[in-house]
Image (tube, rainbow, N blue to C red):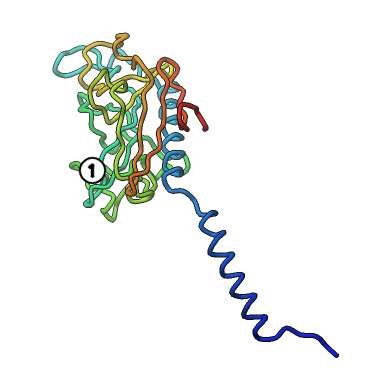
Amino acid sequence: MKKAFTMIELVFVVVVMGILAATIIPNTRTNPLQEAAVQVLSDIRYTQHLAMVDDKNDITRLDSITGLTKWYKERWQILFSSNGGSGGEMGYTVFSDSAGDSTGNPDEAEIALNPGNPNQRMTGGYNGANTKLDIDDANFVGMDRLNIGKQYNIANVAFSASCNGGGPSTRIAFDHLGRPLQGNRSSNLQSLDNNDLIQADCNIVLTDNEGDIITIKIEEETGFACILDGANCII
């Protein structure tokens, strides 16, 4: 006599599998906040790399107003902004402030090229005269993933006071040695002063729409960047 499963047994197996799936699958889902932090960390390190291989040291670059050399205003930097689209989502841009007299704001030609696709610029969107920097524009030249508000539900990015000498900041720049520099380079009137270097570790805190946070630390002097778990670097 052949043995077979009854309908009740099959239904029972299906129910058990459903319960197991409902229990296991949520634990295998990715964490958007962690994904965002890993991506931002990678692009901070890439910004530092650009600064070290392309230090902008060109004494023939003159400011039209002061007549003084201005190459030091063109340091590579990463700027966070909520001007990435009509919804005001948080995004960031990697650029060298080289156009004109250096305004502190990114123009299309100043933005780093995506190393994986030279047809794209490394921006998650920035409102300005050029609509191609608007993530909602059909001709957007940037990268959707850099708009971490839309891509990862990041609601806010906050810098510790140490990132800008005690004041608020939305950017970090690097010199030719990879050392982190504080503040907006466009206001500098000299090539380099020790006060330009951050004087303590800079913490960048990402907050998602649920209120959860994750912190990226950039060490003073070396510019070493990592994701923190408590006081310890984990990546």
Q: Residue at x 43, y 19 (%)?
A: 178
**Residue 54 image offset from top left, x and y in percent:** 41, 23
The answer to which image quadrant residue 177 occupies is top left
| Residue lying farthest to the top in this orientation | 194
**Residue 68 image offset from top left, x and y in percent:** 21, 12
The answer to whether residue 50 is visible is yes
Amino acid type indicated by mark 1? Asn
Is 227 located above or below residue 6 in the figure? above
Please name whichever residue, 206 or 121, is drawn nearer the observer in this view of the structure: 206
The answer to which image quadrant residue 99 occupies is top left
* Disc 1 secondary structure class: loop
Q: How many marks?
A: 1
The answer to whether residue 147 is visible is no
Q: Is residue 124 left or right of residue 30?
A: left
Please name whichever residue, 103 or 60, is drawn nearer the observer in this view of the structure: 103
**Residue 121 image offset from top left, x and y in percent:** 36, 41
Q: Residue at x 46, y 39 (%)?
A: 38
**Residue 138 image offset from top left, x and y in percent:** 28, 56
The answer to which image quadrant residue 190 occupies is top left
Q: Residue at x 37, y 46 (%)?
A: 143
Q: Which residue is mark 1?
A: 83
Is 219 located above or below residue 126 in the figure? above
Is 187 located above or below residue 89 in the figure? above
> Circle 1: is it few (<14), some (14-19), or many (20+) Cα within 10 Å?
many
Instruction: Name the quadrant of the N terminus.
Output: bottom right
Q: Is residue 14 left or right of residue 167?
A: right
| Residue lying farthest to the left in this orientation | 65
| Residue lying farthest to the bottom in this orientation | 1
Q: Is residue 32 left or right of residue 195?
A: right
